[in-house]
Image: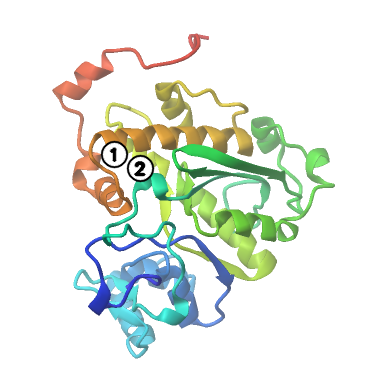
Amino acid sequence: MTPGMPRPDSVTANPPIVATQVRARPTTLSGRAAALLAGGPLDARTLMRQVCQVERLQEDAAERMAVALLGSHPEFARLPSGQWTLQGDPATATSPVAPPGADGTAPKLLDIAFAVVDVETTGTRAGAGDRITEIAIAQVRGGAVVDVYAQLVNPERLIPPYISALTQITWDMVKDQPRFREIVPQVSARLAGHVFTAHNVAFDWRFVSEELSQGAGVQLGGPRLCTVRLARALVPTLSRRSLDHVTRYFGIEIGARHRAQGDAVATAEALLRMLRIAADEGITTWPMLEAHVASPGAKRRQGASDRRRRAFPLPVDKDSSA
C-alpha cells in the first residue's frame, strides 16, 4: 500500500494521491526498497535492479532476491499482480497533494499541484559523471502556472562543447553560480507536495534524484507524470511527441528552447492544455488520469477518424514554415 493512504479498513473508493517527498536517504537495502516503493508498486526485477544497483538481472533471480530481502519485513507486501508495495505505515505517511472531497471522493485534477521540472545537463548519464547545469520548476495549481523558479548551477565539471552549442550554457556562465547542494532547500521546497512532472519524466527525475542524493543525502519519492505519455494518451493524432511537436500542436511558443525555464514553462502550458482535454473527455481525477494514461487504448494505432483529423493543419500562432 502506498504511504499516505489509509489502512485497508478505512480505504475509500478514490483515495487521495500522495505528493512528492524529499527525505533522508536510506542506507540499507530494505531502506532503498522502501524509498523506491514510496513512488508506487514495482515488479521484482525493476525493484531489485535499482536496490542492488545491477544492470542485468533475470526475472526469476529477481523474484528470489525480493522474497529473501523483503519477505520477512512487515512493511512490504506482494500484490496479486506480483508487484511489491508498501503497507500503510502511519510512521511513513505523507500529506496528500489535495485532500479528498467532503464525500470522500478523489481530488479533482484542478485541485492537484504539479511541479513541472526541466533540467539542462552536461550529458545523459545521471550518476555516472554528468551533472545539472540549469534547473527550472514551474508550479501549476488551479489551472494556471503560479510560480516559476530557474537557476543556473555550477556542475563542478567542464561542459562539453556540443552541449554548450545545444543549450548555449557555457562554463563562464556557470562557474560562479551555486552548486546544486547549495540550492537543495529551494528545490526541495518547490517539489514537496506536488506531482513531479516533466516531458520524458524519467530523465529529469534521475538527474534531480541523483543531485539531491549526492549533494544532501535526501531521497525523492512520490507520484510522477510524464507529459510525453500524457500526449500519447490524450492527443493520439500526433505522430511525434517531442516537446517541439506538442507545443506546436497547441500553439505554444517556447521562450528559449533547450533552456530550463523556457522548456519548463512550455511543458507546463502543454500540461494545462492536456488537462482541459482530459476534462472534456470526463477525466477529472488523478486515479482516472493514471488509468487512462496506463490503458492499452492510450497506445492504440490511429484509426480512420484520427487520420481525417490530421488532415487539418495544426493550430499555431505564428508562421512556422521557416
Q: Is residue 28 left or right of residue 102?
A: right
Is residue 224 or residue 158 the one in the foreground? 224
Q: Quadrant of residue 58?
A: bottom left
Q: Amino acid at mark 2?
A: Arg
Q: Residue furthest bottom?
A: 72
Q: Which mark is residue 229?
A: 2
As helix, strand or loop, the secondary structure at mark 1 comes to: helix
State the residue in front, 280 or 119: 280
**Displayed quadrant of residue 242:** top left
CA neighbours of label 1 inside 10 A, class few (<14), some (14 to 19), many (20+): many
CA distance separating discs 2 and 1? 6 Å
Looking at the picture, does residue 149 appear above or below residue 51? above
Secondary-structure class at tag 2: helix
Q: Residue at x 68, y 67 (%)?
A: 216
Choose between 272 and 136: the one closer to the eye. 272
In the rendered image of this protein, does residue 168 appear above or below residue 201?
above
Q: Are marks 2 and 1 in contact (CB under 8 Å)?
A: yes
For residue 161, what is the image quadrant?
A: top right
- Residue corresponding to mark 1: 233
Q: Position of residue 301 (x, y in %)?
A: 20, 33
Residue at image position (46%, 27%) is 247
Q: Position of residue 147 (x, y in %)?
A: 60, 42
- Would residue 88 appear left or right of 183 to someone viewing this image? left
**Is 48 on the left-hand or right-hand side of 138?**
left
Q: Which percent across, then down, holds residue 232?
A: 31, 37
Disc 1 residue type (three-letter): Ala
Q: Is residue 59 above or below residue 76?
A: above
Image quarter (top left, top right, bottom left or bottom right) of the N terminus: bottom left
Q: Position of residue 92 (x, y in %)?
A: 46, 77
Q: Residue at x 53, y 56 (%)?
A: 206
Q: Residue furthest front?
A: 102
